Image (cartoon, rainbow, N blue to C red):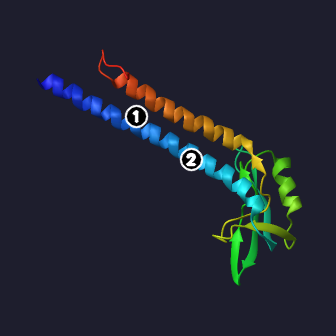
Amino acid sequence: MKSGSKKRSQGGGGYVVAALFAGIGASILIWVLGEIRFAHVGQQWPKVQATIISSRLESLGVKSGYAPQVLYKYKVQGHEYLSGRIFVGSRAGSKNWAQSFVTTYPVDKIVEAHFNPKRPSDSILEPGQISWTNVYGAIAGGSLFILSGIVILLVGMPRGRGLL
């Protein structure tokens, strides 16, 4: 009797772990879809004049590469906002790639930023541009978490019981 109840509690824990993995995977995929939507919807957002206030190259370590750190300010209805979002996706790459953004957006340059009319603190300099490297990685990672949850669920099921 004790061994049977022990098996049930282990199975219940397996369900929790499976649900946790699947939930993490689903959250990652939902986040990715939101980022892709942000990139495309941003193209229809109103434009505002923005000023670059900081632009530098940041080393992320030997294997991580470099990231452009571009900060800009803009005003919407008298409120000033700061943002560092250039585009959606990876913010790290080769030194030349990152330097190209620092060169494109030097300090004091006046640029156009697209802002979310419903939440003006959301803005982007290059809407529609997506760096697919991180997007693909996040899709793969989210899918892997979901698949792991399914495998944990199936492995933890008592023998002789299937899903169908």
User: In the rendered image of this protein, does residue 78 appear above or below residue 47?
Assistant: below
Amino acid tagged 2: Ile
Query: Where is residue 29 drawn, in percent x and y?
Result: 57, 43
Q: Earlier in the sequence, mark 1 or mark 2?
A: 1
Query: Where is residue 6 drawn, in percent x and y?
Result: 19, 28
SS of the residue under disc 2 = helix
Q: Residue at x 72, y 61 (%)?
A: 85
The residue identified by callout 2 is: 30
The residue identified by callout 1 is: 18
How crowded pointer 2 is (Cα within 10 Å; few <14, some 14-19, many 20+) is rated as few
- Please give left or right for residue 12 compared with residue 25 in the image: left
SS of the residue under disc 1 = helix
Q: Residue at x 62, y 47 (%)?
A: 33
Q: Is residue 63 visible?
A: no
User: In the rendered image of this protein, does residue 147 appear above or below residue 20?
Assistant: above
Q: Residue at x 86, y 74 (%)?
A: 108
Amino acid tagged 1: Ala
- Please give left or right for residue 8 compared with residue 47 in the image: left
